[in-house]
Image (cartoon, rainbow, N blue to C red):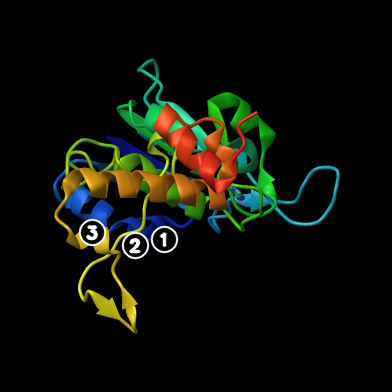
Amino acid sequence: MVFHVLTLFPEMIRDGLNTSVTGRALDKGLISLNAVNIRDFSTDKHLHVDDYPYGGGAGMVMQPDPIYRAYRSIVGEGGKRPRVLYMTPQGSVFDQPMAEELAGEEELIFLCGHYEGVDERILEEIVTDYVSIGDYVLTGGELPAMVMIDAISRLVPGVLNNEDSAEFESFHDNLLEHPHYTRPASFLGKEVPEVLLSGHHARIEEWRRQESLKRTYERRPDLLEKAVLDKKDLAYLKSLGYDKT
Ligand code: 6GU
């Protein structure tokens, strides 16, 4: 999987992804990162990439030309055009199904805006998807691009050590994960749930399923609507007060 990022802060992108799981995936060549500095494509003698908004108003607007040239340095004329994701609070909200869908692409281009915005004409010309990471406003698209690259990378085969670990986690089946425990068995007077020490695998699995259901019911009841639940799950949820109408 190849991630291209068009940005004014390529170091932020590289530094943010060079560590931990994504850092190892980059080292192993399972993913690759091409952070392109839009400023390198300015033709202005002072390397300007922004200008005052037509019609007046506060702030500056990123000019279309350097972005277009940066884009053209990745995508040649006539070749196949990878999806271009523009990071904006006006986009569709990124979620796990979107991460899964994007993980099926061979190549993705992220466009990170700054200042008050980006000239509309370059967006019309190259952007295929408008994506937000949530309902709050950030100063630029770099953090959203890194969030998305992280979420997509962990779905690329080989990136996580354990083959199944991507599958059995929060949001798999739209349920939150059960709690985890490790040594010591007693910490600040708090004991590890006894069933986990029992070695009884069937009981452990049942306990984990119930904890997962309880947690989802308590913290994210909205997710239960989309969860795949069997009769036993529903009976347990009912005992907690969940009323599926
Ligand atoms: Cl994708 N970009 C920016 N600039 N702000 C955001 C966002 C994206 N998602 C939420 N806020």
Disc 1 marks which amino acid?
A: Met
Residue that numbered label 2 is attached to: 15
CA–CA distance between discs 3 and 2? 39 Å
Where is residue 153 shown, x and y percent of the image? 31, 42
Residue plotted at (26% across, 64% down): 194
- Where residue 18 sits, quadrant-wise, is bottom left
Which corner quadrant holds the N terminus? top left
Q: Nearer the viewer, residue 19 or 134?
A: 134
Disc 3 marks which amino acid?
A: Leu
Mark 3 against mark 2, which lies toward the viewer?
A: 3
- Where residue 14 sits, quadrant-wise, is bottom left
Residue plotted at (39% across, 46% down): 210
- For the residue with label 3, is its CB less than 8 Å from the closest atom of ligand 1? no
Residue that numbered label 1 is attached to: 12
Residue plotted at (22% across, 74% down): 185
Disc 2 marks which amino acid?
A: Asp
Mark 3 and mark 1 in contact (Cβ < 8 Å)? no
Task: Give the class, few, some or many, for how many residues have Cα within 10 Å of label 1's Cα (few <14, many ≥20).
Answer: some
CA–CA distance between discs 2 and 1? 5 Å
- Where residue 163 sits, quadrant-wise, is top left
Which corner quadrant holds the C terminus? top right
Kindly tell me whether residue 171 is visible in this rendering: yes
Residue that numbered label 3 is attached to: 196
Mark 2 and mark 3 in contact (Cβ < 8 Å)? no
Mark 1 and mark 2 in contact (Cβ < 8 Å)? yes
> Does residue 239 appear to the left or right of 79 in the view shown?
right
Image height check: is 35 above or below 186? above
Where is residue 156 shown, x and y percent of the image? 25, 36
Q: Nearer the viewer, residue 227 or 158?
A: 227
**Disc with the residue nearer the chain's start (1 vs 3):** 1
